[in-house]
Image (tube, helix red, strand yellow):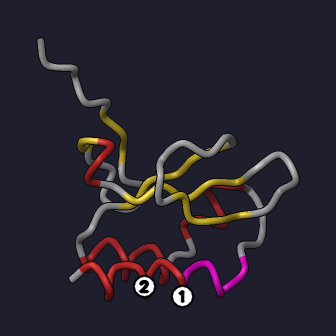
Amino acid sequence: MNKKVPQRMCIACREMKDKNDLLKIVKNKDGQIELDLTGKKAGRGAYICKSSECHKKLNKQKLLNRTFSMNVDAKIYEQIEEFYKIQN
């Protein structure tokens, strides 16, 4: 029997996609933001898909700041860009 893959929403395009196809960004209980490459870290999660339009929107509108209700360091946005450059 196949396990159903959980769906998550991309914070940029607002489309529901398979969790495995998205990058998870986590705000842990200490308020630190980090990329979650395993998808298993505890904390408030936000997801972004692989499309370049979504990355542009994420950076331009500083969507992580709004999602986590805090000022997110520019290094996090850079890490997301680097992650997808390596993936493609």
What residue is shown at x 71% (from left), y 73% (from top)?
A: 72
Q: Position of residue 7 (x, y in %)?
A: 30, 34
Looking at the picture, tell me which residue is in the foreground, 82 or 9: 82
What residue is shown at x 83% (from left), y 56% (from top)?
A: 31
Q: Is residue 72 left or right of residue 24?
A: right
What residue is shown at x 75% (from left), y 50% (from top)?
A: 28
Q: Which residues are magenta?
A: 73-78
Q: Position of residue 33 (x, y in %)?
A: 70, 64
**Alpha carbons under labels 1 and 2: distance apart:** 5 Å
Q: Quadrant of the C terminus?
A: bottom left
Q: Secondary structure at mark 1?
A: helix
Establish if 78 lies above or below 30.
below
Q: Amino acid at mark 1?
A: Glu
What residue is shown at x 74% (from left), y 56% (from top)?
A: 69
Q: Which residue occupies the extreme front position in the image?
A: 1
Establish if 62 lies above or below 34.
below
Residue on which the image places disc 2: 81
Establish if 50 lies above or below 81.
above
Q: Amino acid at mark 2?
A: Glu
Image quadrant in which you'd find residue 64: bottom right
Residue on which the image places disc 1: 78
Q: Is residue 66 left or right of residue 13?
A: right
Is label 1 in contact with label 2 (beta carbons under 8 Å)? yes
Q: Quadrant of the N terminus?
A: top left
